[in-house]
Image (spheres, rainbow, N blue to C red):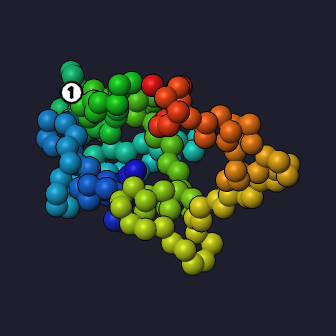
């Protein structure tokens, strides 16, 4: 579970809820977990259609290249480095991804009260008992017929068999040997 915090307008910091570390991208485009907040932890958040978001490094991007890029200003556009995760859940290098690739599209979700309780349980804290928080389901008493109640005596025929002595006259019944 990741916590996304606004740093400035359109700029966010992404922090792991359980680890307490910030998501960061280094100058080689690799994602890593930083213990401390720095400029490498800042990402440009862009909201796309259908609710998907992309996160690009604020600090690093690819400079324009190719013929004419140095001669004509504005001819080559800088390419942003995006946070991206492959199909196996491993991070991809920022400069290898585009904003249109599935691996760089994220669907943020706001946690509801049940999710907050789940997080609290996973962190080892006790569930809240007051308020409208998570409460364990109470078991309803089951209705049984008069002869077959839970916790009552076993049927008489079973009682007689258990209590009858074994072949030697005393001791445990024969079926216990």
Q: Residue at x 31, y 56 (%)?
A: 18
Secondary element under disc 1, as helix, strand or loop, is loop
Residue furthest toward the top?
67
Q: Nearer the viewer, residue 36 or 56?
A: 36
Residue 91 in the image, given as x and y percentages of width and height? 28, 33
Image side of residue 91 versus residue 26, left or right = right
- Location of residue 175 with respect to 1 vertically, above or below: above
Q: Residue at x 45, y 48 (%)?
A: 46
What residue sits right under mark 1 in the picture? 65
Residue 143 in the image, given as x and y percentages of width and height? 82, 53
- Location of residue 17 with respect to 99 vertically, above or below: below
Displayed quadrant of residue 157: top right
Displayed quadrant of residue 5: bottom left
Q: Is residue 66 visible to us here?
A: yes
- Location of residue 151 with respect to 102 vertically, above or below: below
Image side of residue 105 versus residue 36, left or right = right
Instruction: Mark 1: give few (<14), some (14-19) or many (20+) Cα within 10 Å.
Output: few
Q: Nearer the viewer, residue 175 or 120?
A: 175
Quarter of the image containing the C terminus?
A: top left
Q: Is residue 42 visible to us here?
A: no
Q: Residue at x 14, y 35 (%)?
A: 28
Image side of residue 174 versus residue 45, left or right = right
Residue furthest toward the bottom?
130
């Amino acid at each position: 579970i990741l916590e996304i915090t606004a740093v400035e307008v359109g700029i966010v910091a992404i922090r792991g809820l359980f680890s307490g570390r910030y998501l960061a991208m280094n100058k080689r485009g690799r994602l890593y977990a930083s213990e401390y907040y720095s400029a490498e932890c800042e990402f440009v958040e862009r909201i796309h259609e259908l609710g998907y978001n992309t996160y690009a490094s604020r600090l690093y991007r690819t400079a324009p290249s190719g013929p004419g890029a140095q001669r004509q200003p504005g001819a080559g556009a800088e390419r942003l480095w995006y946070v991206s995760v492959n199909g196996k859940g491993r991070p991809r290098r920022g400069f290898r991804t585009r904003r249109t690739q599935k691996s760089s599209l994220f669907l943020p979700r706001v946690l509801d009260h049940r999710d907050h309780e789940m997080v609290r349980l996973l962190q080892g804290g006790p569930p809240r008992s007051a308020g409208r928080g998570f409460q364990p389901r109470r078991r309803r008493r089951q209705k049984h017929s008069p002869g077959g109640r839970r916790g009552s005596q076993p049927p008489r025929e079973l009682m007689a068999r258990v209590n009858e002595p074994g072949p030697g006259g005393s001791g445990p019944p024969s079926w216990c040997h």
